[in-house]
Amino acid sequence: MKVVSLFRLGELEDKLIETFPQVEFKFIKKAKNIPNEDRQSLDILIGYDGNLDETFLKDCPNLKWIAWYATGVNALPLTYIKEHNIKLTNSRGVQAKQLSEFIIAFILDDYKKMRTSYINQQNKIYDSKMTGRRLNGDCILFLGTGAIAQRTAKLAKAFDMKVIGVSKSGEQKKWFDEVHKIEYLSDLLEKGDIVINSLPETNETIHLLKYEDFEKMKASAMFINVGRGTIVEEDTLIKALSNNEIRHAYLDVFEKEPLTPDNTLYDLDNVTITAHITGNDYSINEDVTKIFIKNLEHFLNYNNVIENEVDLEKGY
């Protein structure tokens, strides 16, 4: 059994080698640098490389499983993976720790006017009458009720916030006051003081939000996107913000990345931009490797995985 990594894992490499002495491990930075003989003989591919494509996978005739060290798998050749019965796991749930903290940070930054305080500091203005807003009693409307939304909902409950979610199934989740099927989203938009997208990219979610959806949101609403930028066409989002259909947006993901310097979003006063960093976490490789170890133990015995397997039909 040969496992090839798409990046170096530091001390975790020794842990893997010690834990599985019967397995041959190769740790190589980037798919393009993996020698052909390793491509031909590898059984398992682990790690992350944004340039991993179908052409590379065709060079791996024995590939049985990809352990992807990221949550989103939409850039992978999922059709090829499905047709060749390759198992795919991801880091679902791991990045929720960091993402949920960022979401709460965005909300507090906005509600407590931290940016205004910083601008005042830069301009040597002392405004003791500035008053922030309470989170208590306000409503979060989540698009998606997965790990990110659930962990954020748990944190939001510490502030006595109301949390509503929409999902494909409409199945009730812990920490949510209400969960509805996503087809009822249009009727729920006006309830959200904060509307948060945490949905993955699928055929159903691309450009899910239209201009009229922003019109239905409260004029005082805040929109946070940490899911995928394709949830709304960029021109539609820019138009909604330019027309003040909502008060403010915190955006970490974009329809086209990276943003170019001439992107109109940079010119809007009611937008806060982060460069797709909300999932960055120094501890993520360690956490995902723990999942990989658990799965590899099972795979070696039963030729199957038990945690974080991606549904290739759904794409998440």
Image (spheres, rainbow, N blue to C red):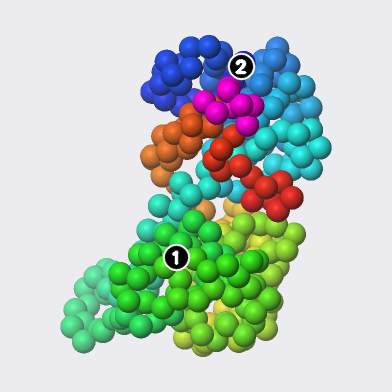
Q: Secondary structure at mark 2?
A: strand
Q: Nearer the viewer, mark 2 or mark 1?
A: 1
- From the viewer's perspective, tell me whether residue 212 is left or right of residue 190: right
> If the image is split into quadrants, where does the N terminus sit?
top right
- Which residue type does callout 2 highlight? Lys
Left or right of residue 161: residue 257 = right
Decide which of tag 2 and tag 1 comes sooner along the chain: 2
Picture disc at residue 174: 1
Rendered residue at 71%/46% (across/down): 312
- Residue 303 horizontal/vertical position (percent): 64, 27
Q: Is residue 107 left or right of residue 226?
A: left
**Residue 89 makes an appearance in the image:** yes
Q: Considering depth in this image, is 296 or 199 the residue closer to the camera?
A: 296
Give 303 or 17, whichever is nearer the viewer.
303
Magenta residues span 297-304
Instruction: Look at label 1 and name its amino acid.
Output: Lys
Seen from the viewer's position, the closer of residues 29 and 159 is 159
Q: Main secondary structure of the magenta part?
A: helix
| Discs 2, 1 touching: Cβ within 8 Å | no
Identity of the residue furthest to the right in this view: 83
* Residue 2 disc label: 2
Indicate whether residue 259 is drawn in magenta.
Answer: no
Q: Position of residue 113 (x, y in %)?
A: 32, 76
In the picture, residue 261 is in which quadrant? bottom right
- x 41%, y 78%: residue: 162
Rendering quarter of residue 158:
bottom left
Q: Is residue 215 above or below residue 107?
A: below
In the image, is residue 42 above or below residue 298? above
Dot 1, crowdedness within 10 Å: few (<14), some or many (≥20)? few
Residue visible at 52% across and 26% down in the picture: 297
Packing grade of label 2 (10 A; few <14, some 14-19, many >=20) is some
Say above or below: 251 vs 55: below
